[in-house]
Each structure stands twice: as C-alpha cells, then as structure tokens.
Amino acid sequence: MTGPIFVDGAEPGDSLEIHIQNIEFLHPWGVTAFLPGGGTLPDDFPVQRSQTRSDRRESRHGAVRSGDHVAPGAILRVDRVAPPVLQGRISSTAPGPHGGNLDNKDLVAGSILYLPVNVTGALLSIGDGHGLQGDGEVTGTALETSLRGTFQIILRKGKRLGWPRAETPTHYITMGLSEDLDQASRLAVREMVDFLVTEKAMSRDDAYLLCSLAADLHVTQTVDMTKGVHAMLPKSIFR
C-alpha cells in the first residue's frame, strides 16, 4: 500500500474523484498462485502452486506472457480511504463502503473511481498491482506484479456517496459488496438506480426498467470474504 495520502479540505460527507491517468510496469514479470484453503474452490485444490509469467523482451510497458501473447490490463486493485472512525482498525483485505480490495479489472488507466470521505483528510491509499485478472479472481490471486501509477485526485465537496462508484470511457459502474453474492447484486443494482435518479434525473421506476434493459452485472471477485458484484451501464445509450 502507498499512503495514506492526506487530501487538504476533505471532510466527512465529501467524496474523492480519482482519475487513473497512467499505470506502468516496473518489471516484465508477475506471479500467480493458489494456496490451501483459499480461492473459490478450496476443497478441489488443497495444495499450493505458483507460476511466474514473464516476457523478457519488454522491460516496463510490455505484455506479460506465458506461451501465447497475453496483453495485460494493469490495475492497482486496492483503492481505499479510511473507514468511519467508529469502525476502528480494519484489514485492507475485504472491500467495503470505504473501497479497499475492490479487485475490479475495469479500473485501468483512463478510468475514474469515486470514493466517499469518512474522516478529515480522507487518507487515501493505493496498492496491490495486477498485470492481468479475470472477473472473479477465482484462485485468490491475479498476475501479481509491481506497478507505478499517476493519479489526479479531485475533491468533491458535499457530494455524499454510500458506496464506491466508477466510470470508464465507455461505461458507468456501480458496486455492491457483501459476504452474500445475492445481496451484493442487490446493492449494485440499487446503486445504479440511485445514480440514474440523481445524475440523469430519471424516475426510480424508469431507472429500474433501464437497468434490466441495458445494465450488465459482473461478479467482481469471490475470494476476499466480502464478495463483489459491479453493474456496468453503457454511456452510449445517453444523448
């Protein structure tokens, strides 16, 4: 983790708009693994195995490969602010309303992440670089590697958020996080309905109907105690 970063003027009830401007590889290799008792299928794989995947032709920006060429979508999967003070000290492993170990593979360069501010200064931390990851991150690891990122942080005064949100150049994203995957799905859809009501001036009924017509639900990850579902709505449907 890099941080915490103190954001001047940030107070509870505000939010951070984090523009992911650039992500670079620090070396041309990464490690993926599974461990006993971890992942989505712990009973099926009660052993330990790891692989190092590399491409020696590229030093910083190139693709990481094993056999066939694989073009990675580099992400820094942990983006979090400090939780509310009354929660006390918590682990960075499980994600929550404060962000955390989101494991959302769409948070690549060019994306924007929105996080609520819970304490003075927000105390933003970023880390845990992935060179490549599928939705679900089923073994408990992705392609773990070292990355360097450039971010622009914009403070949105008075813009209150209940859960992390994001957008890519092509989609709006809302997130649901819960130990129960069904509840995570409900939260993601509820957040998208709220987004359409507050940001697109739609009625709740129309927003809910639109979610069924155009929003795609993706399982973000299933391995960090708290599971994730994110809803993706294409920007192209709006004028």
Image (cartoon, helix red, strand yellow):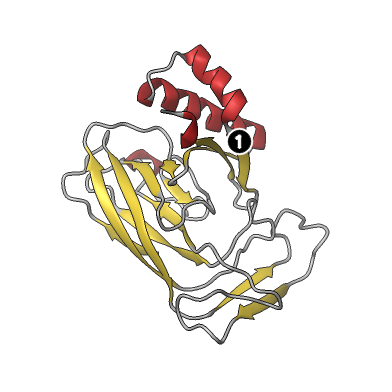
Q: Which residue is mark 1?
A: 216
Q: Is residue 20 left or right of residue 120?
A: right
Image location (x, y in percent) of residue 144: 56, 69
Q: In the figure, 47 relative to 221: above or below?
A: below
Tell me which residue sits at (22%, 44%) in the image: 120
Q: Residue visible at 38% across and 48% down?
A: 112
- Name the element at disc 1: strand
Place of residue 148 in the rendered image (x, y in percent of width and height, measured from the top left): 38, 70
Q: Nearer the viewer, residue 203 or 220?
A: 203
Q: Position of residue 61 (x, y in %)?
A: 46, 75
> Outermost residue toward the front?
239
Q: Residue at point 54% right, 19% down?
A: 208
Left or right, 35 with reference to 114: right
Where is residue 35, by image quadrant? bottom right
Q: Amino acid at mark 1?
A: Asp
Q: Quadrant of the C terminus?
A: top left
Image quarter (top left, top right, bottom left or bottom right) of the N terminus: bottom left
Dot 1: few (<14), some (14–19), or many (≥20) neighbours within 10 Å? some
The x, y position of residue 192, in whole percent, is 49, 29
